């Protein structure tokens, strides 16, 4: 598993560095022993490397991020407490101007985006990597490079399945940034699980009229509410198995706010509270009031066997005078 692989990697690194090895250009090289009577200070790891060797290691970390090895690259940064030079090398040339992150040449080299939309600049996930590096950076490095994250007002990113968890973590840590420009990768919509923090992150900005997650079978009420808050015109969750009262309320509210349709045709069970919300719910569209169930294409789409339960509940209710 990735966790066991990371543990083995850290164990091996510890064994090698304990014997005096340092990493140079991806190869383990025996370091010179300190002169007698002198002790190696904490923070000296890698200080004997040349500028070219430091740049090579920084590029190696960036290549991991750019290649989708998000957690592995993040683990290297977390373990680099004794290598402040690495953070300095990674962030050299980066700036924060007019509320936006300006990328260095090394970042532009690794993070050229495939997106061509004019509302996004051209460097993919570079913003998120820079924030991730800043998150792990020693305070003295941030001061040295004058990178104050409180000045960042907008961030761009293209989350996919492999990066979503890491991006959600960064979003939580930099919650004061309000303008998140999110353009999901296509593979994200095949994801099988979505945490509350990931759903909150995605809800910050949604630029698509319709959204569909084909494989999400279980979602918490909080995650459902975050997705509904994003308010796409069409929300498709065909694999969702059950519906609670709180989730049903979020869906009905979404319809009332103007969503055209919500598809939940994989439902197998509905709570009693959800039945109450669905049976009373209606929404307004072109000045006419529609029942939330509509075979014509507008409204809330759920399996007929569960729709029957709701209709039976409505029939049992006392009629208003």
Image: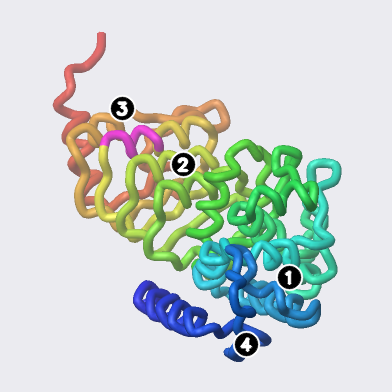
The outermost residue toward the left is 316
- Judging depth in this view, the residue of 34 and 15 nearest the camera is 34
Q: Of marks 3 and 1, which one's residue comes earlier in the chain?
A: 1
Q: Of marks 2 and 3, which one's residue comes earlier in the chain?
A: 2
**Left or right for 174, reference 50:** left
**Left or right for 191, reference 177:** left
Q: Which residue is mark 4?
A: 26
Instruction: Assign a secondary structure to mark 2.
Output: helix
The Cα–Cα distance between marks 3 and 1, rounded to whole angstroms, is 50 Å
Tell me, yes or no, whether the two marked residues, 3 and 1, touch with CB atoms within 8 Å.
Answer: no
Instruction: Bin the neighbour count of mark 4 within 10 Å (Cα to Cα): few under 14, some 14-19, many 20 and up.
Output: few
Q: Does residue 246 belong to the magenta stretch?
A: yes
Q: Nearer the viewer, mark 2 or mark 4?
A: 4
Above or below for 8 versus 266:
below
Q: Of marks 4 and 3, which one's residue comes earlier in the chain?
A: 4
Instruction: Assign a secondary structure to mark 3.
Output: helix
**Left or right for 86, reference 317:** right
Looking at the figure, which quarter contains the C terminus? Answer: top left
Residue 102, by quadrant, is bottom right
Q: Position of residue 67 (x, y in %)?
A: 61, 77
Instruction: Assign a secondary structure to mark 4.
Output: loop
Q: Which residue is mark 2?
A: 226
Residue located 39% across and 80% down the image: 8
Instruction: Bin the neighbour count of mark 3 within 10 Å (Cα to Cα): few under 14, some 14-19, many 20 and up.
Output: few
The Cα–Cα distance between marks 2 and 4, rounded to whole angstroms, is 43 Å
Q: Of marks 4 and 1, which one's residue comes earlier in the chain?
A: 4
Task: Tell me, yes or no, if residue 233 can be seen here.
Answer: no
Q: Which residue is mark 1?
A: 111
Tell me, yes or no, whether the two marked residues, 4 and 3, touch with CB atoms within 8 Å.
Answer: no
Tell me, for residue 166, which label it has, or none. Answer: none
């Amino acid at each position: 598993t990735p966790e066991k692989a990371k543990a083995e990697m850290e164990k091996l690194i510890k064994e090698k560095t304990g014997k005096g090895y340092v990493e140079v250009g991806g190869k383990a090289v025996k370091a010179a022993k300190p002169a007698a009577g002198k002790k190696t200070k904490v923070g000296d790891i890698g200080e004997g490397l040349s500028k070219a060797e430091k740049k090579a290691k920084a590029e190696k970390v960036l290549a991991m991020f750019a290649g989708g090895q998000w957690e592995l690259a993040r683990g290297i940064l977390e373990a680099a407490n004794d290598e402040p030079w690495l953070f300095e090398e990674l962030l050299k040339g980066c700036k924060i101007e007019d509320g936006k992150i300006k990328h260095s040449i090394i970042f532009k080299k690794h993070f050229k985006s495939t997106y061509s939309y004019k509302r996004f600049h051209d460097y993919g996930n570079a913003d998120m990597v820079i924030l991730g590096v800043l998150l792990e950076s020693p305070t003295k490095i941030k001061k040295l490079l004058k990178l104050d994250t409180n000045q960042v007002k907008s961030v761009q990113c293209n989350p996919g399945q492999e990066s979503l968890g890491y991006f959600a973590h960064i979003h939580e840590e930099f919650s004061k940034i309000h303008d998140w420009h999110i353009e999901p990768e296509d593979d994200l919509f095949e994801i099988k699980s979505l945490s509350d923090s990931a759903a909150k992150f995605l809800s910050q900005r949604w630029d698509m009229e319709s959204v569909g997650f084909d494989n999400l079978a279980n979602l918490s009420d909080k995650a459902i509410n975050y997705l509904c808050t994003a308010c796409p015109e069409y929300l498709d969750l065909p694999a969702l198995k059950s519906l609670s009262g709180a989730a049903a309320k979020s869906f009905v509210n979404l319809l009332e706010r103007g969503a055209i349709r919500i598809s939940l045709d994989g439902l197998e069970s509905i709570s009693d509270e959800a039945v109450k919300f669905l049976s009373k719910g209606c929404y307004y569209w072109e000045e006419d009031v529609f029942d939330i169930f509509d075979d014509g294409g507008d409204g809330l789409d759920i399996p007929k066997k569960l729709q029957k339960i709701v209709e039976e509940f409505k029939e049992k209710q006392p009629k208003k005078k």
